[in-house]
Image (cartoon, grey):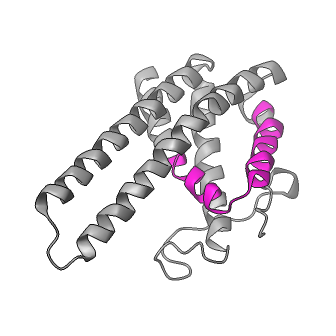
Amino acid sequence: MYRLVLILFSLLAAGAALLTPALAQTGSTRAQDRLLEYKRRQLPQVLHLDQGQVDRLLEVERRHQPGLNRLRQDIRRDLQRLSRLLDRPQPSDAEVKAVLESLQGKRDQLQSLRQRQMDEAAALLSPQQQARYLIFQQQMRRDLLQQVRGLPGAGWGRPPGGGLQTSPPAPADTQLPDLPRD
C-alpha cells in the first residue's frame, strides 16, 4: 500500500511539474507568490499539518524550484533548436541526433530532480497525508490549467473545451487565486 501511494505521489509530482512552465509563461512572480500563499493556507486543512510542517514541505519545493526551472528552460531551448533544425530543407542527421541526445539527457535530469523532490516531500508525510497531498496537487493543477488556458497567448493547441473534464467551482475560500493577466 505504501509503495502504491509513493508511486502515485511521484506520478502526480511529474504531472504537477508541468504547471510551473505555465506559470513561468505568465512572467509573473506575483502569481507564484499567490500560489505559495494559497498552499500555505490550504495545506494545514487538507493534510492536517501544523504551520511548521507546512513550512518544511514548502521549503522542499522552494529548494528544488530553481533547478527545475533551469532544466525546463533548457528543454524549451532544445525543442526550439530542434524545430529550427527540422525547418531546414535538409537537416543534418548528426545535428538532429545531438539535439535529441541533449534533450533526453535534460529530461532525465529533470525526472531525477523531480524524484528527489518527491522523496523529500514524502519523507515529511504519512502515507495518508501523501495520498491527500496527491489529490490536492491534482485538483490544484487542474484548476490552474483551466485558468492558464484563459490567458491571452496561453494556447495549448486545443479548441476551447478541448476534452478536459471540468469540475464544479469550489467554495470561495478554497478556490485558487486568479492568475494576474498582466
* Looking at the image, residue 84 lies above or below residue 113: below
Lateral position of residue 85 relative to residue 7, left or right: left
Kindly report the secondary structure that dominates the magenta region of the rendered protein: helix
Q: Is residue 12 visible?
A: no
* Looking at the image, residue 125 lies above or below residue 144: above
Q: Residue 9 location in percent, x, y?
A: 50, 34
Query: Where is the C terminus found, in terms of image quarters?
Result: bottom right
In the rendered image, the residue lying farthest to the right is 173
Q: The magenta stretch spans which residues? A: 15-44
Residue at image location 63% in from the left, 26% down from the top? 60
* Looking at the image, residue 26 lies above or below residue 68: below
Magenta span has 19?
yes
Q: Residue 154 location in percent, x, y?
A: 59, 72
Residue at image location 27% in from the left, 76% down from the top? 87
Mark count: 0
* Looking at the image, residue 2 lies above or below residue 134: above
Q: Residue 59 location in percent, x, y?
A: 69, 26
Magenta span has 104?
no
Q: Residue 44 location in percent, x, y?
A: 79, 30
Lateral position of residue 159 relative to residue 61, left or right: left
Q: In the depicted view, which residue is nearer to us: 7 or 59?
A: 59
* Quarter where residue 176 is shown: bottom right
Query: Where is the N terminus found, in terms of image quarters?
Result: top left
Q: In the depicted view, which residue is nearer to us: 99 or 118?
A: 99
* Quarter where residue 109 is shown: top left
Q: Is residue 104 visible?
A: yes
In the rendered image, the residue lying farthest to the bottom is 159
